[in-house]
């Protein structure tokens, strides 16, 4: 199954080599050549994994990683470092990187680490989660509790179920029919307008600007997509 990978690297030769390597392995690859561009692309939430160099123009890989994790990004991050110093490795892991690889490295080792991280992400997404954080929202599904800016927010049972389904399928477009089937156990007496109303309620409670949502997006003619 093809995965979406963002490569953030400033060495032209390495960009070409790694892009070809990952594409030949069946992945969709996009690239960015500095930290600011990498952060902007990664923040769109369209990727399964980011291969992130530590030393980048405009913004270091450490800063990119830190800001992504603070924003609630939950994709895998593999950091590349030109030094084998313990401080670089530990520092990257402490701010949210999932793995690191020291340059120079052999292509098979990079592919092995990428595949291992993608398997881990896929397994976590299939199993679902019991708690999740994005922006200023923390939701605990086991306790049916939600905090926004540290303050409790009341959600009805179906709102919790809908939010959980969207989060469990984050970054993927979920069709209206899929939501009605899995959240409402759709039957003829459930109007699709019910879904629109519940989405509107969630946006009112969770989004900073419900009219221009950052997290619960409408995909016209299809359904919705949740972006952390």
Image (cartoon, rainbow, N blue to C red):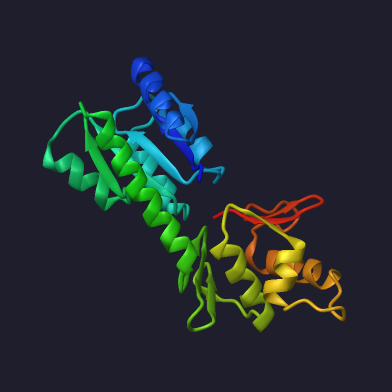
The answer to whether residue 156 of the structure is visible from this angle is no
The percent position of residue 154, horizontal first and vertical second, equals 62, 80
State the count of labels: 0
For residue 135, side relative to residue 70 (left or right): right
**In percent of the image, x 54 and y 46: which residue is there?**
45
Tell me which corner region of the image, top left, top right, bottom left or bottom right, holds residue 189.
bottom right
Which of the pair 138/10 is nearer the observer?
Answer: 10
Residue 50, position in %: x, y?
41, 40
Going 36% across and 35% down the picture, which residue do you hit? Answer: 52
Give how far across and how far down residue 68 sits, in percent: 43, 47
Q: Nearer the viewer, residue 24 or 188?
A: 24
Q: Can you give x and y, in whole percent of width and height, for residue 146 in the image? A: 54, 75
Residue 178 figure quarter: bottom right
Q: Residue at x 58, y 52 (%)?
A: 171
Q: Furthest residue to the left?
A: 85
Q: As displayed, is residue 166 above or below residue 47?
A: below
Left or right of residue 90: residue 22 = right
Q: Is residue 53 left or right of residue 38?
A: left
Q: Is residue 137 above or below residue 15?
A: below
């Amino acid at each position: 199954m093809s995965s979406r990978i963002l490569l953030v690297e400033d060495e032209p030769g390495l960009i070409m080599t790694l892009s070809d390597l990952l594409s030949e392995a069946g992945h969709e690859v996009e690239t960015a050549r500095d930290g600011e561009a990498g952060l902007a692309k990664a923040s769109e939430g369209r990727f399964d994994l980011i291969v992130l160099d530590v030393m980048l123009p405009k913004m270091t890989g450490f800063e990119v990683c830190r800001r992504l994790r603070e924003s609630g990004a939950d994709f895998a991050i593999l950091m590349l470092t030109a030094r084998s110093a313990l401080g670089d490795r530990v520092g990257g892991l402490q701010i949210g990187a999932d793995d690191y690889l020291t340059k120079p490295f052999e292509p098979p080792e990079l592919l092995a680490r990428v595949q291992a991280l993608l398997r881990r992400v896929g397994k976590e997404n299939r199993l679902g989660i019991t708690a999740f954080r994005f922006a200023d929202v923390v939701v605990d599904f086991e306790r049916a509790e939600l905090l926004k800016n540290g303050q409790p927010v009341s959600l009805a049972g179906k709102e919790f179920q809908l939010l959980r389904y969207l989060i469990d399928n984050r970054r993927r477009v979920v069709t209206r029919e899929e939501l009605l089937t899995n959240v409402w156990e759709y039957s003829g007496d459930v109007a699709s307008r019910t879904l629109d109303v519940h989405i509107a309620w969630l946006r009112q409670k969770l989004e900073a600007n419900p009219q221009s949502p950052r997290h619960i997006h409408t995909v016209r003619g299809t359904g919705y997509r949740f972006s952390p």
